[in-house]
Amino acid sequence: MGGTFLILIACFLWALDTLIRYPLVESGLSPITIVFYEHLILSLVFAWGAISSLKRIGELTVSHIFSFFVVGCVGSALATVAFTESFHFLNPSLVILLQKLQPVIAIFLAAIVLKEPIEKKFIIWAAFCMIGGLLVSSPDIERFYYLMVSDFSLVVSDSAVKGYVLVLVSIVGWGSATVFGKKLTMAGFETRAILSGRFLAGFLALLPFVSWNRSLILPHGEDYLRIFIMVFISGGMAMWFYYQGLKRISAKTAAIAEMFFPFFAIIVNWIFLGKQLTDLQLAGGVILILGSLVIQIKKY
């Protein structure tokens, strides 16, 4: 099975995650609390990966440890919290638009860290995919335009600046996680070992930021079930497919494939919430598919 296709499966599962994650945030749960429970559960689930990889501890280098730090502490924990928190300071449409810069960060880092060649033809088709991604977010672009026209001060306020910093942390964190995750696969680490290290490192990184009081007790019993379902979908299944795909393709190609996440999120909203797709969004999806197919087939 092709690496790009496996990552597309992961993107679809991440899109399903939004049906649970954002209602939990809107209900008043702290993003840190949600992400904390995610990493706690997944650290326990993938503990067997850590146990089975103990024999490799003596082989760990500073480079390996740093890669796990970036993938787990920065990409899995810090970036997720920062992205969720950014919605408290910025218009959601602007957050989603800025998130489109993530592939650019990942491709840039892949060239520097992994020495992946960035050919001119790849840049052309990557830009083609970026256009598709922007068309998928055309309603957000329209809403952002009206926000600029109606109240520009909201875009440049002190609160907005905090939001920009949080979004920057999230896109750099996720872009870095793609590149250093690929570096771990190149070093021969199995998927279960990477997942174990990712979630354990993320869990440890979250500990200093968690409020150890009654806020950790979820207000509704069904919230625990929702988090378990979310963890199973986006943390367990999705990340397994993602790293299986990342083993098979370059980090820059994976970054392009990850652009399908917002398109799948729109599809999920259409199926489950009845939100209609516009012609521009459908056209953007077609452009994304075409561009990623060319990159995959030509192996740019």
Image: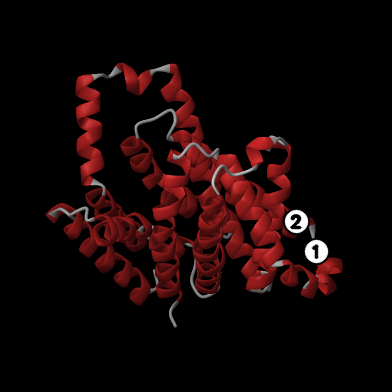
Across and down, in percent, residue 148 comes to: 24, 24
Look at the image and tell me in which quarter the C terminus lies: bottom left
- Which residue, given by chain and number where applicable, does mark 2 sit on? 65
The outermost residue toward the bottom is 1
CA–CA distance between discs 2 and 1?
7 Å
> At 37% from the left edge and 73% from the top edge, which residue is drawn?
296
As helix, strand or loop, the secondary structure at mark 1 comes to loop
User: Can I make out residue 297 in this image?
Assistant: yes
User: Can I make out residue 116 in this image?
Assistant: no
User: Which label number is shown at residue 60?
Assistant: 1
Q: State which quadrant residue 269 falls in.
A: bottom left
Q: Residues within 10 Å of mark 2 (few under 14, many from 20)?
A: some
Quick check: 279 above or below 143?
A: below
Q: State which quadrant residue 213 falls in.
A: top right
Across and down, in percent, residue 69 comes to: 69, 51
Quick check: 232 above or below 91?
A: below
Colour style of the rendered protein structure: secondary structure
- Tags 2 and 1 in contact by the CB under 8 Å rule? yes
Q: Amino acid at mark 1?
A: Leu
Q: Earlier in the sequence, mark 2 or mark 1?
A: 1
Across and down, in percent, residue 204 comes to: 73, 48
